[in-house]
Image: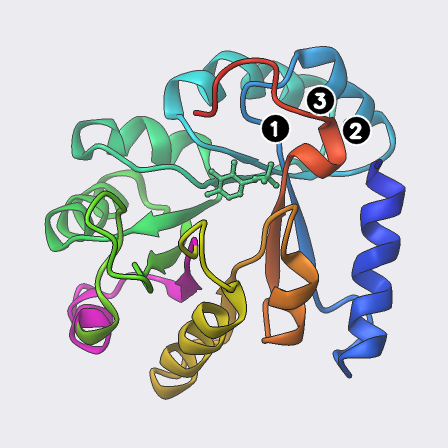
Amino acid sequence: MSLTDIKNRIAAAETRFGRAEGSISLIAVSKVQPNDRVESVLKEGHRIFGENRVQEAAGKWPEFRNTYDGIELHLLGPLQTNKTRQAMELFDYFHTLDRLKLAKRIAAMRDELGRCPKLFIQVNTGNEAQKAGVSPEETDSFVEECRALDLPVIGLMCIPPVDEEPSAHFALLSGLAERNGLAELSMGMSSDFECAIEQGATFVRVGSAIFGERVAPKA
Ligand SMILES: *Cc1c(COP(=O)(O)O)cnc(C)c1O
């Protein structure tokens, strides 16, 4: 696979599932990939990237940003409250807003920094004990709490259970977003992004299918 293959498959899925051309954003997930692989994707002109850890992203993206214009950086991994400031200075989007304490911290930092990343609320669609995210049942009230803080929540994100058909989870997330008036859906990875597009994804997060297998353990 390569960046071009994935872009072609996204375009084909847009056509096949009646989605507007160019309406799906591809987040190239560069976590734990060697810098030369990341740079080759930058050289192909891609600018939207995702990372799981604040520390790792802080170690590579400021330098890439000095060289390449227009980079858009998405935080896809869990965010510790005490890393909020650093994350807000580095990322343009957070996909993992999942608790009120973090929402309040982001709101306070927004007031201090005068800017705020766009936010996705992570929903634990499978109600898995080990997975982050608000439960589907809590989603409406959490969206409301975030709106009361005047946070720029633009959509919902999910990571379906590994051992289940993802389509039901994507459909559930899509219904929750629609009912809350949220336009964006962050769902779909290397193995299931076409299914996610069928179910309404607007951002897909693809790592290994672009960069190859991750060389270090999964972040
Ligand atoms: C690692 C990761 C991805 C990309 O996974 P691939 O299977 O390599 O495409 C997408 N989303 C999240 C939240 C991830 O942690």
Residue 74: percent from left, percent from top: 51, 41
Magenta-colored stretch includes residue 151: yes
Residue 108: percent from left, percent from top: 16, 46
- Mark 3 or mark 1: whose residue is earlier in sequence: 1
Magenta-colored stretch includes residue 86: no
* 56 sits left or right of 206 in the view: left
Q: Which residue is mark 2?
A: 41
Contact flag, marks 2 and 1 (Cβ < 8 Å): yes
Q: Residue at x 72, y 69 (%)?
A: 23
| Quadrant of the rendered image containing residue 153 | bottom left
Contact flag, marks 2 and 3 (Cβ < 8 Å): yes
* Amino acid type for the residue under numbered disc 1: Ser
Q: CA distance from mark 3 to mark 1?
A: 6 Å
Q: Which residue is mark 1?
A: 30
Q: For the C terminus, which image quadrant?
A: top left
- Mark 2 or mark 1: whose residue is earlier in sequence: 1
Q: Which residue is mark 3?
A: 38
**Magenta part of the protein: which range?**
138-159
Residue 99: percent from left, percent from top: 17, 53
Q: For the N terminus, which image quadrant?
A: top right
| Quadrant of the rendered image containing residue 21 | bottom right
